[in-house]
């Protein structure tokens, strides 16, 4: 894919952030190198690119700020009520940060939506290729482990990263002109990374997302179905075979394919494959928190099978911030996707599916996806008013 647009400082910062995001050099819960780069981009967007706020952006901004205010209020009140326990308030910073990322990118992308969405695709595909190279070269600290984490803190983070990258690439490709082969290679590379993580939730969600994409390819991308399938299979198997034959421990013990099969066959049988083991039981055990929320942190307060956070995006929001916080978050998501045809929601839907067993709301790429939904909905609506559907024009370009 050729990028002919002028290379600006904000694009360089965005590329650096996306490529460096998977590298966790500091302890979990602390800002990483990529986050400091994003802070510069946030500052730049709000100071120099804010511009005029129309009604749609203003309403989306209002919903986001209201959601963030609810997070601060609930965690702040509980921190005071529990005797100044700041552990309950500490998670607030990640909601504020991710909300700022989403809004800053919306502001930035609205200047030239198609150009920036195309740039996000390029940055995401580049990041996937970098991680695939690390995987096959054995450069990661855990290269001898069966479940790969690369430079993340745990394998589930790697799997979720791959899933989000796949979703972002598929979303971008619906609304900007993306060459077919780079798109399918990006999907195959994402599959390889997800499979190496052996995250059951990520594998199931990725397969489901790709199947929906294949079905849409039959309907919308006439002539691309078999090229799609071939490129994805070739790119994913290439990464796998290189990984298989460069990792001596995998060769001597079990192939990655056997591990995937064992993980999927044991679905529902492992100790954490039930609702109680994911922390859902605390909702039933503590109905008093349903309305206002219990805040996040000090999980030993609760009667639950686990003493950690609730391993679910929506369930954690519901228990931690109550009905109001959950409704506000759903409204933020709806505010982002509003204006899209229902069929375009599927990349986000499979992120939510993954989030049924993992709390993925603190992953910044999730909020970047919401920013992309908001911007692509806006430009698609604008294009339709001018006499054409942006998606249909892009599909025509892909066929050609």
Image (cartoon, rainbow, N blue to C red):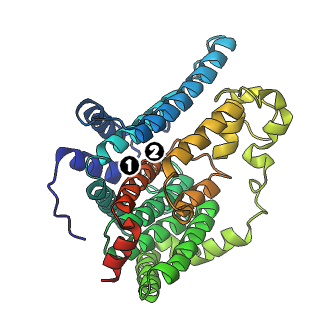
Instruction: Note whether 69 is above or below 310 in the view shown.
Output: above
Residue 262 relative to residue 369: left or right: right
Local SS, label 2 = helix
Where does the image place residue 206, in percent across and percent down from the top left? 56, 67
Instruction: Residue at 41%, 75% (x, y): give it.
Output: 239
Looking at the image, residue 176 sits to the left or right of residue 377; the answer is left
The residue located at (51%, 51%) in the rendering is 338
Tell me, yes or no, whether the two marked residues, 2 and 1, touch with CB atoms within 8 Å.
yes
Quarter holding the N terminus is bottom left
- The residue shown at (64%, 16%) is 77
Residue at disc 1, secondary structure: loop
Local packing at callout 2 (Cα closer than 10 Å; few below 14, some 14-19, many 20+) is many
Q: Quadrant of residue 332?
A: top right
Q: How many marks?
A: 2
Measured as percent of width and height from the top left, residue 109 is found at: 31, 48
Visible residue check, residue 192: yes
**Residue 95 visible somewhere in the drawing:** no
* Residue 16: image location, x then y, percent: 27, 49
- Front-lying residue, 148 or 130: 130
Q: Which image quarter: residue 102?
A: top left
- How far is the residue under mark 2 from the one under mark 1? 9 Å
Which residue position holds label 1? Answer: 21
Where, by quadrant of the figure, is residue 256 drawn?
Answer: bottom right
Camera-side residue: 392 or 87?
A: 392
Q: In the image, which disc is placed on residue 364?
A: 2
């Amino acid at each position: 894919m050729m990028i002919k647009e002028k290379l600006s400082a904000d694009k360089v910062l965005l590329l650096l952030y996306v490529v460096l995001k998977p590298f966790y050099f500091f302890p979990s819960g602390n800002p990483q190198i990529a986050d400091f780069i994003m802070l510069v981009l946030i500052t730049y967007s709000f100071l120099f690119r804010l511009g005029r706020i129309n009604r749609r952006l203003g309403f989306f901004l209002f919903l986001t700020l209201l959601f963030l205010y609810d997070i601060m209020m609930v965690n702040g009140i509980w921190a005071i009520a529990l005797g100044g326990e700041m552990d309950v308030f500490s998670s607030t910073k990640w909601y504020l940060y991710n909300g700022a990322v989403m809004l800053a990118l919306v502001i930035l992308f609205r200047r030239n939506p198609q150009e920036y969405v195309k740039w996000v695709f390029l940055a995401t595909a580049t990041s996937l290729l970098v991680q695939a190279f690390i995987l096959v070269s054995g450069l990661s600290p855990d290269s001898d482990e069966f479940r790969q984490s690369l430079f993340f803190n745990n394998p589930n983070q790697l799997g979720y990263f791959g899933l989000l990258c796949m979703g972002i690439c598929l979303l971008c490709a619906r609304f900007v002109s993306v060459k077919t082969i780079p798109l399918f290679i990006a999907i195959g590379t994402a599959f390889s990374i997800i499979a190496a993580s052996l995250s059951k939730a990520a594998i199931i969600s990725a397969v489901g997302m790709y199947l929906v994409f294949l079905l849409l390819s039959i309907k919308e991308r006439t002539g691309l179905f078999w090229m799609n399938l071939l490129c994805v299979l070739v790119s994913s198997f290439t990464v796998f075979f290189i990984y298989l034959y460069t990792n001596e421990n995998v060769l001597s013990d079990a192939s990655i394919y056997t591990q995937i099969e064992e993980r999927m066959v044991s679905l529902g049988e492992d100790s954490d494959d039930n609702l109680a083991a994911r922390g859902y039981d605390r909702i039933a055990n503590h109905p008093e928190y349903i309305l206002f929320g219990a805040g996040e942190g000090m999980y030993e307060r609760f009667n639950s099978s686990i003493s950690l956070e609730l391993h679910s995006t929506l369930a954690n929001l519901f228990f931690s911030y109550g009905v109001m916080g959950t409704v506000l978050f759903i409204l933020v998501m709806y505010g982002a996707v509003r204006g899209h045809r229902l069929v375009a929601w599927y990349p986000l839907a499979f992120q939510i599916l993954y989030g049924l067993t993992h709390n993925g709301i603190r992953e910044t790429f999730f909020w970047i996806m919401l920013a992309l939904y908001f911007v692509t909905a806006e430009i698609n609506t604008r294009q339709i008013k001018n006499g054409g559907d942006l998606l249909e024009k892009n599909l025509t370009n892909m066929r050609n």
